[in-house]
Image (spheres, grey):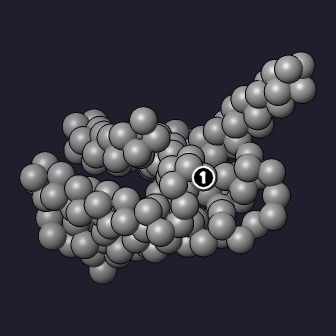
Amino acid sequence: MRIVLYLVSIILANVITAAFAPLKFWGFIVPMGTLLIGATFIFRDLVQNKYGRKKTYLLIGIALLLSAVVSFLLGDTLIIVFASAISFLLAETTDTEIYSRLKLPMSLRVFYSGLVGGFLDSVVFVIIGLSPIGANFLPWEAVPAAIIGQLVVKTVIQGLGAIVLHRVHDVLDKRVSMN
């Protein structure tokens, strides 16, 4: 189920981004699929917990391929597909390595690794894909707002995911100690 959630969330993020106009709030610009991108880091961490790093990297490769194919089929330009692939690969592998190395409770590993992964994903995708050096969807003046908007959304999602994981872990610990 973890693998399915991970892969489906990546595909849905592409579909939602293509289907809906970006969300604009307080001067920030956030593609609608960003709401799921933060969740993909959490799902990937859950996959890694169960199956280990080696299988996680295999799934990152599969997810990368699926994401690129879906993005292209939805009509994204090659530069957007390329930027998405590069940012995805960098963010997911960095998140995986940070998550693996932190010696903290799972909820904190999810949060901290997701913060770094989300930062890399946002910066790289916006600059390579959306800025004037990419598809030129955003002028340079709008690039910081796009990056910050995505970071805010991804951070909130990572934080919520970490809180939920912490609560679930507490409940499971109480059940185990009662038995």
Residue 98 image point, x, y percent:
66, 69
Question: Could you tell me how many numbered marks the image carries?
Answer: 1
The answer to which image quadrant residue 8 occupies is top left
Residue 127 image point, x, y percent:
40, 73
Name of the residue lying farthest toward the bottom: 133
Residue at (72%, 56%) from the top-left corner? 109
Residue at (29%, 60%) from the top-left corner? 62
Residue 55 image point, x, y percent:
44, 63
- SS under mark 1: helix
Q: Residues within 10 Å of mark 1 (few under 14, many from 20)?
A: some
Using the rendered image of the protein, determine whether residue 169 is visible from the camera's viewpoint.
yes
The answer to which image quadrant residue 48 occupies is bottom right
Mark 1: amino acid: Asn
Above or below 88: residue 35: above
Which residue corresponds to mark 1? Answer: 49
Using the rendered image of the protein, determine whether residue 91 is visible from the camera's viewpoint.
no
Q: Nearer the viewer, residue 53 or 81?
A: 53
- The C terminus is located in which quarter? top right
Name of the residue lying farthest toward the front: 179
Residue 23 located left or right of residue 41: left
Above or below 86: residue 172: above
The answer to which image quadrant residue 125 occupies is bottom left
Residue 43 located left or right of residue 130: right
- The N terminus is located in which quarter? top left
Residue at (18%, 52%) from the top-left corner? 70
Above or below 171: residue 129: below
Residue at (74%, 46%) from the top-left corner? 107
Residue 103 image point, x, y percent:
81, 64
